[in-house]
Amino acid sequence: MDFKAIWEKWTSISLILRIIAGLLVGIALGLLIPGLPYIDLLGVAFVQSLKSVAPILIMAIIITSLITRSTGLGSRFKSVIVLYFLSSVIAAAVSVIVFYIMPVALPVISEEPVGAVTTFEAFLDSIIRKILVNPIDALANTNYLGILFWAVLIGILMKPIATKHTADLSQNITDMLLKVISIFIQFAPFGVLGLIYEALSNNGPELFVDYGALILIIVLSMVLVMFVTNPLIVAVAGKRNPYPLLLTCLRGSAITAFFTRSSAANVPINLALCEEMKLDRDFYSTSIPLGSAINMCGAAITISILALTAAYSIGIAVPIEQAIVLCIIATLCACGSSGVAGGSILLVPMACAILGVPDDVAAYMVGVGFIIGVIQDSLETALNSSSDVLFTATVDANNKKKAAKAEETAIE
């Protein structure tokens, strides 16, 4: 038996089609013959494989991004980066507000919160104790706050002293870990089959009501960001009616991004759209690829809502101060999601960590993310990618206005 040929044939089929097939088979089995042994182990194995590599992967991604990041960016790039981050923070805040209005609880595998806190002082104490730990302990115990702290510290301190060989080694390690994750992701259809089968066996058809409600609040949050908050940012920053530009971006970028489900794959489409809009090539040729990596407002929504759902499902009340920190953490997580196969879903555990959600529940939410990913990931990518062009065009227009005004002043 030629396993290589089988593997190539398996991976040549669209992952989304395979996941849909696994989802449908899992639903059929769960409804018709619930309670069969071993099928649920497919979901357990899939979730455990992701849990095993996620901590070291997240640390490697953050360190590598800090070591290899560009320096000396001009004012235009600084402006577009500010818009990228502002959009993500606001998107996370919108998703938190929507969740507070329409909370969703899912049946999960743990009933007791771990490390939940009830006062702001206790919350700060919990954060400090999780951050200031031995980095090896942080990795071994999947302490994502400790991982985040040490990764940022190492990356910042390494940046001024890292040689090209150091940066290349860091990038190679990250690429290797991403390759491992990509292999695990190829088995997502079996994992989704096992997860949805176990969920249906334990909870029956009413499970669809819960998943439907979760998808609804994610879609509602993304629609609000796409048609309300992002245009508002453009209106304030660019002093213009944002909707003609927004519609151009949706037609030229969002539709293809919805089906490719990859911001990186949509970069050529966005570059062509910028050329069609007659933007400054020197600017957009950098800002668009940059946006595909760090402009992740859709991912911030997904991470925030899945983390809040995990907390709400096990009875953790999230006060406003924790919600604010969640928005910031979700934004930071989102910025790292572009390099990960499975994107924002795999970074949900880091956001769950600040809410006192047990590791098993956080991993379960990763599985839930793959189940709803057919809709969530497509809309998330459409929002992320189209907003790259939206904010690039806004900053480019502002720069041209300033240049024209400076030229008029010089003539006078």
Image: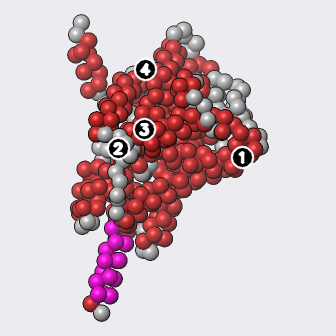
Please determine whether, in this image, residue 391 is positioned above or below residue 378: below
On the image, the x and y values in percent for residue 366 come to 52, 31
Q: Nearer the viewer, residue 357 or 43?
A: 357
Main SS category, magenta section: helix
Which quadrant would residue 94 be assigned to in this image?
A: bottom right
Foreground tag (4 vs 1): 1
Foreground tag (2 vs 1): 2
On the image, the x and y values in percent for residue 260 come to 32, 42
Q: Nearer the viewer, residue 65 or 160?
A: 160
Question: Which quarter of the figure is the C terminus placed in?
Answer: bottom left
Identify the residue at the far bottom of this view.
412
CA gap between label 3 and label 4 equals 32 Å
Q: How is the image coloured?
A: secondary structure
Please report the residue visible at 35 percent of the width from the left and 77 percent of the height from the top. 402
Identify the residue at the far top of this view.
1
Classify 10 Å Cα crowding around label 1: few (below 14), some (14-19), many (20 and above): some
Classify 10 Å Cα crowding around label 4: few (below 14), some (14-19), many (20 and above): many
Classify 10 Å Cα crowding around label 2: few (below 14), some (14-19), many (20 and above): some
Q: Residue at label 1?
A: 319
- Please tell me the numbered disc located at residue 63: 3
Question: As shown in the figure, which amino acid type bears the numbered disc 2?
Answer: Thr
On the image, the x and y values in percent for residue 247 come to 37, 62
**Secondary structure beneath disc 2?**
helix
**Secondary structure beneath disc 4?**
helix
Foreground tag (3 vs 4): 3
Please determine whether, in this image, residue 396 is positioned above or below residue 174: below
Please report the residue visible at 47 percent of the width from the left and 51 percent of the height from the top. 297
On the image, the x and y values in percent for residue 399 come to 34, 72
